[in-house]
Image (cartoon, rainbow, N blue to C red):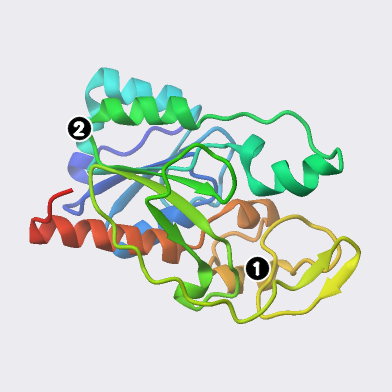
Amino acid sequence: MTQPTDIRRDGERPLLLDLFSCAGGAAMGYARAGFRVHGCDIADRPNYPFTWYRGDALDYLARLITSGEIGRYTFVHASPPCQAKNTLTVGTNRSRGWGGTHVDLVAPTRDLLDRTGLPYVIEQPNGQAEIRKDLTLCGEMYGLGVIRHRNFEVSGCTIEQPAHVPHRGRVRGYRHGHFYDGPYVAAYGNGGGKPTVPELQEAMDITWTNVREELTEAIPPAYSEHIGRSFLASRVLGVAA
């Protein structure tokens, strides 16, 4: 396991903690917004483009809090797994008897994040995950080739909600045995009609990994770049949370 670098010698930009980091879709957006980023994920993520620690994200966050090291950070992004309550699980998969038991780490993640005293966001896909939908982002807001709605619970700051842009058509692919064409690719699964890896990379603006699983789990960097820029602008302007 590699420990994060000593951020006191790591430049002057604010430092962000990226929990449940996957391959760094969120991390890249925050970096583009002006943050330095440290990530943590329990799975091996050799494609993660920034300083990274392999381990249980909640254990790691608890250690940062107990040691006082959490004070080095300015903002926290967390994307805890909650597959038990996402739309695909509670809809198509469950109705057809697919899938197994999934974990829900949203509540324990929120409890620890509240203990940090830092501004944070918790990101989740559409569905029944128990977060406040303070912010909802969509690929069409940024001219991307995916829809990929994502909800964010925002604490300790205010993030601008962009206007939702009407979709230009369907997501390309098969639905219950029927193929539909459209301007967006399906950034999930690996069945018939799903995009190639290069198509996914282009649609999501993620070029540093070519692992399909990592691409289908990621959020487009444009989402977190919007969050990061809104947060930093509010601090510069002295906007209250």
Secondary structure of the residue carrying tag 1 is helix
Q: Which of 170 and 219 is in front in this view?
A: 170
Query: Does 31 sit left or right of 223 as displayed?
Result: left
Instruction: Return the x and y of residue 167 as percentages of the image width and height.
Output: 58, 77
Q: Nearer the viewer, residue 154 or 23?
A: 154
Query: Does 199 sit left or right of 149 as displayed?
Result: right
Mark carried by residue 71: 2
Q: Are marks 2 and 1 in contact (CB under 8 Å)?
A: no
Mark carried by residue 237: none
Instruction: Residue 117: tell me if it is visible.
Output: yes
Q: Please state which amino acid type lies under the numbered disc 1.
A: Leu
Query: Does 165 sit left or right of 127 as displayed?
Result: left
What residue do we see at 50% from left, 78% from top? 143
Q: In this view, does 154 lie above or below 100?
A: below
Q: Please state which amino acid type lies under the numbered disc 2.
A: Gly
Q: Which of 86 and 117 is in front in this view?
A: 86
Mark 2 closeness class: few <14, some 14–19, many ≥20 residues within 10 Å: few
Instruction: Return the x and y of residue 138 as percentages of the image width and height.
Output: 50, 66
Question: Residue 230 appears in which quarter of the rendering?
Answer: bottom left
Q: Is residue 152 above or below residue 236?
A: above
Q: From the image, tell me which residue sits under label 1.
A: 200
Number of marks: 2
Instruction: Return the x and y of residue 214 as percentages of the image width and height.
Output: 62, 52
Q: Is residue 18 above or below residue 212?
A: above
